[in-house]
């Protein structure tokens, strides 16, 4: 009976996801850049990127109990890897103005020559996967010494490594690969993703990042519900008890760290698509703090909460409260002192209110399906005569 209910819930979730993806495609076609609702597409694009980043961080911080602050560094690796391997050969010399480009391979060009439009899609997909693999590889190397640390010491160490990565990528000696402190551009981005059907062009600029985030989050959900996920939770709850049950702490911590970093790299590649540029200065430690804030707002230990927290954060900061900086919004007039940053003031107050009323985040440790399940009433004990 329980297995049938789980299958039914999985199918319902699958249908809802398909309907949502179909809605995104429709919105991509009917909303134009001149429309007032165009910010909705921006929120969906950026929100999907940060939702994936928040869920991948939650896999490590919330489900395994490893407090890491190196997420921005792994996203940086993913963004640069994707950009480097998708820049067209004709634009490479223009992008690397001050260096002689050491890597001249473009996956979309290689496969499009033989497979046409499908080859371009395949090349982009391989670049995204390679971005995740490169982030995972570095995470494995960093994890060997770092995962022996715990709590705040682990957070400080990973934060330090993230800053080192950002500095190294701007090092002029690596200019032929990373373009030094200059930005990377002209690579495959969301605005170029279009599909020709019967003479009409179908835009996929919002659908592609949403699809990447959806597939990645689905894989993370499967991992969390697997034996590995149960081992992660056991380590989070009590390492001594987990080890007594036969769980290899070092092995499972490394798996969690590498897996989280892989999807952080994928999120970085998707962010490069959305922003159309890749530059190390965009991946500062403040980005990690923002992602951590999304996880806390949604609920540590809840994948649904991480997605909700990311979408609310991006919607409020990029759309709903944007008008506050212009002077007035929804009848609220910005004081002269805060005219240029009134949006951040109101946003900070809103976050504090949410944290005060939702101590464990909006979802806590629950998932969306849990909200629709009927609670079983506790049996009433008969009074002893």
Image (cartoon, rainbow, N blue to C red):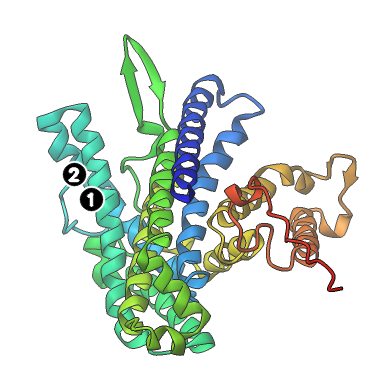
Q: Residue at x 76, y 53 (%)?
A: 343
For residue 85, which numbered disc appears in the image? Answer: 1
Mark 2 neighbour density, 10 Å: few (under 14) some (14–19) many (20 or more): many
The residue closer to the viewer here, 143 or 66, is: 66
Whether residue 73 sits left or right of residue 101 in the image: it is right
Q: Decide which of tag 1 and tag 2 comes sooner along the chain.
A: 1
For residue 107, which numbered disc appears in the image? Answer: 2
**Location of the C terminus (image quadrant):** bottom right
Q: Residue furthest front?
A: 385
- The correct choice, above or below, for 159 with respect to 10 in the image is below
The residue closer to the viewer here, 180 or 329, is: 329
Q: Residue at x 47, y 53 (%)?
A: 52
Mark 1 to mark 2 CA distance (whole Å): 6 Å
Residue 50 seen in render = yes
Q: Position of residue 291 (x, y in %)?
A: 55, 62
Q: Position of residue 280 (x, y in %)?
A: 41, 63
Q: Residue at x 34, y 62 (%)?
A: 262
Q: Circle 2 sits in a helix, a strand or a loop, which is it? A: helix
Q: Residue furthest top?
A: 198
Q: Position of residue 68 (x, y in %)?
A: 48, 76
Q: Quadrant of residue 330?
A: top right
Number of numbered tags placed on the structure image: 2
Asked if the residue under mark 2 is in contact with the one under mark 1, i.e. CB atoms within 8 Å, the reply is yes
């Amino acid at each position: 009976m329980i297995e049938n209910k789980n299958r039914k819930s999985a199918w319902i979730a699958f249908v809802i996801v398909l309907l949502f993806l179909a809605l995104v495609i429709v919105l991509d076609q009917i909303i134009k850049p001149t429309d007032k609702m165009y910010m909705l597409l921006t929120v969906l694009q950026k929100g999907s990127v940060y939702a994936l980043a928040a869920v991948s961080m939650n896999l490590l911080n919330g489900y395994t109990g490893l407090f890491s602050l190196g997420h921005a560094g792994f996203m940086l690796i993913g963004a640069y890897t994707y950009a480097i391997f998708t820049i067209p050969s004709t634009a490479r010399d223009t992008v690397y103005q001050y260096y002689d480009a050491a890597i001249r391979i473009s996956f979309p060009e290689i496969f499009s020559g033989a497979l046409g439009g499908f080859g371009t899609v395949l090349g982009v997909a391989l670049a995204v996967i390679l971005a995740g693999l490169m982030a995972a590889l570095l995470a494995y190397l960093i994890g060997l010494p770092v995962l022996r640390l715990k709590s705040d010491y682990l957070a400080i160490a990973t934060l330090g490594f993230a800053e080192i990565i950002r500095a190294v990528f701007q090092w002029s000696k690596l200019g032929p690969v990373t373009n030094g402190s200059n930005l990377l551009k002209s690579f495959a981005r969301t605005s170029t993703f279009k599909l020709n059907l019967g003479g009409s062009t179908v835009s996929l600029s919002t659908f592609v990042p949403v699809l990447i985030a959806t597939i990645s989050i689905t894989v993370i959900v499967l991992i969390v519900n697997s034996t590995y996920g149960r081992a992660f939770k056991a380590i989070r709850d009590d390492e001594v008890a987990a080890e007594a049950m036969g769980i290899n702490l070092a092995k499972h911590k490394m798996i969690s760290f590498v897996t989280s970093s892989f999807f952080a790299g994928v999120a970085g590649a998707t962010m490069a698509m959305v922003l159309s540029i890749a530059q190390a200065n965009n991946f500062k430690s403040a980005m990690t703090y923002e992602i951590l804030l999304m996880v806390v707002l949604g609920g540590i230990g809840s994948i649904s909460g991480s997605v909700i927290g990311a979408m609310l954060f991006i919607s409020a900061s990029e759309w709903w409260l944007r008008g506050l900086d212009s002077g007035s919004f929804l009848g609220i007039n910005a004081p002269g002192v805060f005219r240029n940053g009134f949006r951040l003031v109101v946003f900070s107050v809103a976050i504090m209110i949410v944290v005060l009323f939702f101590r464990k985040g909006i979802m806590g440790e629950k998932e969306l399906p849990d909200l629709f399940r009927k609670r079983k009433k506790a049996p009433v004990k008969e009074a002893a005569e």
